[in-house]
Amino acid sequence: MTQNNPILTDDFGRKHNYLRISLIEKCNLRCTYCMPAEGIALSPKKDLMTADEVFAIAQTFVQHGVNKIRLTGGEPLLRKDFPEIIEKLAQLETEISITTNGILIDRHLDVLKQFNVKKINLSLDTLVPSKFNTITLRNQFEKVIDNLHLLLNNDFKVKVNVVLIKGFNDNEIIDFIKLTEYLPVSIRFIEFMPFAGNQWDRSKMVSQTEILNQVSVHFSESNLEKLQDEKNFTAREFKIKNYLGSFGIISSITNPFCDGCNRIRLTANGKIKNCLFSNSETDLLTPYRNGEKLENIIAAAIRNKKKVRAGMTTPEAVDNPLLNQDNRSMIAIGG
Ligand code: SAM
Ligand code: SF4
């Protein structure tokens, strides 16, 4: 393996050892902040990576220093060949994790255990069943909660992703943190981000400062512990004294963490996205199918990466719909 090979290092010295692969554009939920109300134009099946192609392209990245792969989507567990994909990727020298809405966890529990997929990020934006239906447009709250407990009972390392939206779930921040008193989970509050068709505006976003204010008032400053952030962190980590679990805040909008970014994304139709906020994409699947070597193409995509949020360095740029809507919807990127 060529560790830290320059092809995965950008002009700012950031080494990209973390590949996030979207396996599918479809989903069994319709989260309104992710999936536009009118739906998205799906790629024809022939344009999506097969299990073998996912493996081959991932292998190229691993040969050049990637040692973490996260599978996402759409809903990655909806792929009928999910077990086959995991089995193939497990041959690579890399950690594998998934981000899922949790609905199909019970169906795939055995394969996750068999191939040592221990880290699961499960998305759950509310603890109130009727609100779950409002935000996801589907009636699956109980299934998700059951599967969350199934994961914890089977010793998976679970992070719960909560996208905070003002007036919808900002009154549940404390309830989510209370879950960490007895459950070994990390709750990750995510600032709502703008993507094509998701009706974002800054007033709907709940900022890191607002979250910490609520927490300090409720639990008192002296019970709030700052934890050591992970290397290349996205979430700034905290816990309440003597609680089993912890919580983190992913503040891509108000306090971006681009300096330490080590992430590169591959969409289900085989395009590199060098930043979540970037509208520019580099096709890898077509050259792969044409038998071309991928290294130079990957290197060029990495070199094009901007220092901060795809060049949206100021709050004004983030707020500008001409910039923030000129990107795929989140469901087609993979978070
Ligand atoms: N379906 C899986 C799930 O929901 O976990 C994986 C794909 S989903 C696109 C990945 C993550 O992106 C989820 O945690 C979701 O909450 C988050 N996400 C989607 N749209 C977002 C937005 N507009 N702002 C912030 N996070 C968002
Ligand atoms: Fe589906 Fe995940 Fe997007 Fe919700 S956030 S619509 S579960 S892809």
Image (cartoon, grey):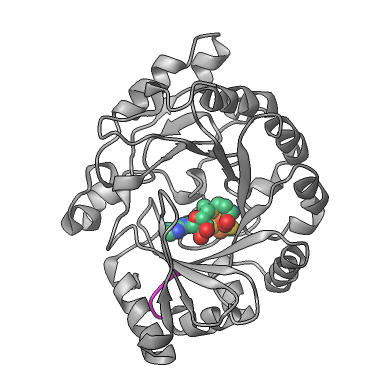
294 or 165, nearer to the observer: 294
* Residue 195 left/right relative to 306: right
Percent across and percent down for residue 327 are 36, 43
Looking at the rendering, the quadrant in which ligand 2 lies is: bottom right
Percent across and percent down for residue 115 are 76, 42
**164 falls in the magenta region:** yes
Q: Quadrant of residue 273?
A: top left
For the N terminus, the image quarter is top right
**126 falls in the magenta region:** no
Q: Quadrant of residue 217?
A: bottom left
* Residue 64 left/right relative to 150: left
* Residue 332 left/right relative to 154: left
Magenta range: 163-168
Magenta residues, dominant SS class = loop
* Residue 309 left/right relative to 283: left
**Viewer can see residue 35:** no
